[in-house]
Image (cartoon, rainbow, N blue to C red):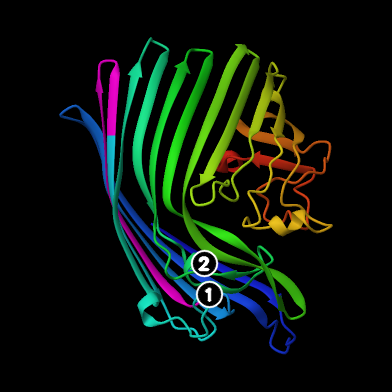
Amino acid sequence: MSFQRNVRQAAPGDSYEDGPEWSVDLVRSVYEIRLDIAHTDVAGFDGTAGIDINVQDQNTRASGLLPDADMLDIGVFAFEERAFNKLTVNAGLRFDYREHDAEPNPEMRLPDTEAGETDDVLTQVYTVLSGSVGAGYRLTEFLAVTSNLGVGFRAPDLFELHAFGVHGGVQAFQIGDPFLDPERSYNIDAGLRLYTERAIARATIYYNQIDNYIYLSNQDRDTTIGGTTLPILAADQTDGAIAGLELSATVDVLDWLRLDGAYSATSSDNKATDEELPLMPADRFSGGLRLCVPNRGIVGSPYVEFRVKHVWSKESAGTYEPFSQFDRIPFGTASTDDYTVFSVSVGGTLALNGQQVSVHIEAENLFDDAYVDFLDTYKGYALSEGRNVSFRIQVPVNLFCAR
């Protein structure tokens, strides 16, 4: 069971008599209850069944961006797995009920109309059944091959359905579409896994076909709000496909030396235009070298780790991709260049008063390189994160209570 309350206030107005008068003032409360029941060895099966209930209350206190709304999500699911000698099979099934109930707001507009949203689109109900099946087969003691088939579902969210106004987070005028259909995905993947005492490695390829894929589309036109010119982004959908490759490995070369690396590549296709889908990640590689130093006095398990991340260049999918306008004006960018950043961290444990205190220091983007990641929300007018130094210490509660 959990409760969250998120308050978003931005762009204070001109009145400060009783505090700032926010032009954006959104409050969202989220209540979640989850119940799982697990079992082992029932007719040879291990599994879990449960229910997940999520209730959200959206209160728009000062904004033309979204209406007030209540949202209810109920999911009922079950997952079972069984091993047959070298073969392991699993299957999962899930039923989802989702309801959006928005309140009329005269500032909301249907796409390309002057009338406010009507009752027939303010309440949206989605019911769907999804599931997956998978199998793994051990070729040898250390090597296994796996494959999965799945059918997925995603309902449009409140922004995609009803947004109409300035969205400061993306510096654009955002328009929703209350007639969006839910997404439906069909996924297949195959993988190879290696497990030994000193090495773990995985290779996975996948293909995901998505019907009614929902995305923000750049309308290639602007609007002026309060003297500021903003691009218009509207919710749209198309049939699409995403294919990819993921590789990863971790190897303990020596007792004191560990190497790891991961590579991912993605390609996509907008079935309606034969272009890429918007906002797909660039291909990337990350790797690390970890040195474990012998214990020194009160310092236990000391280590030094060096990491590198390289991200390849990526072109905007086309004029319909959000932020594509930045490829045509003298600042910001939609397409991005490749970049490489380095990080270093040191740490260990300190034996204090009979307790182990963990200490870690890390410097990310060690050389303070200037770069822009393709998926950065603010790539139109800001660089990605520069050098970031963090210090973390974990102290057991009973450290100060020891006798």
Q: Residue 355: which quarter of the image?
A: top right
* Distance Cα–Cα, label 2 vs label 1: 7 Å
Q: Position of residue 22 (x, y in %)?
A: 66, 79
Camera-nearest residue between 275 and 17 = 275
Which residue was labeled with disc 1? 66
Vertical placement of residue 20 versus 239, above or below:
below
- The residue located at (82%, 44%) in the rendering is 370
Cβ–Cβ below 8 Å for labels 2 and 1?
yes
Q: Position of residue 45 (x, y in %)?
A: 21, 30
- The residue located at (72%, 47%) in the rendering is 335
Helix, strand, or loop for circle 1? loop
Camera-nearest residue between 400 and 28 = 28
Earlier sequence position, callout 2 versus callout 1: 1
Characterize the local packing of mark 2: few (<14), some (14-19) or many (20 or more) Cα atoms within 10 angstroms: some
Let me know if residue 403 appears in the view: no
Q: What residue occupies the far left of the structure in this picture?
A: 43
Image position of 198 (left or right of 125): right
Q: Amino acid at mark 1?
A: Leu
- The residue located at (27%, 36%) in the rendering is 91
Q: Main secondary structure of the magenta part?
A: strand
What is the number of the mark on residue 173?
none
Helix, strand, or loop for circle 2? helix
Q: Amino acid at mark 2?
A: Phe
Question: Which range of residues does the magenta coloring cover?
Answer: 66-90
Which residue was labeled with disc 2? 159
Q: Residue 363: which quarter of the image?
A: top right
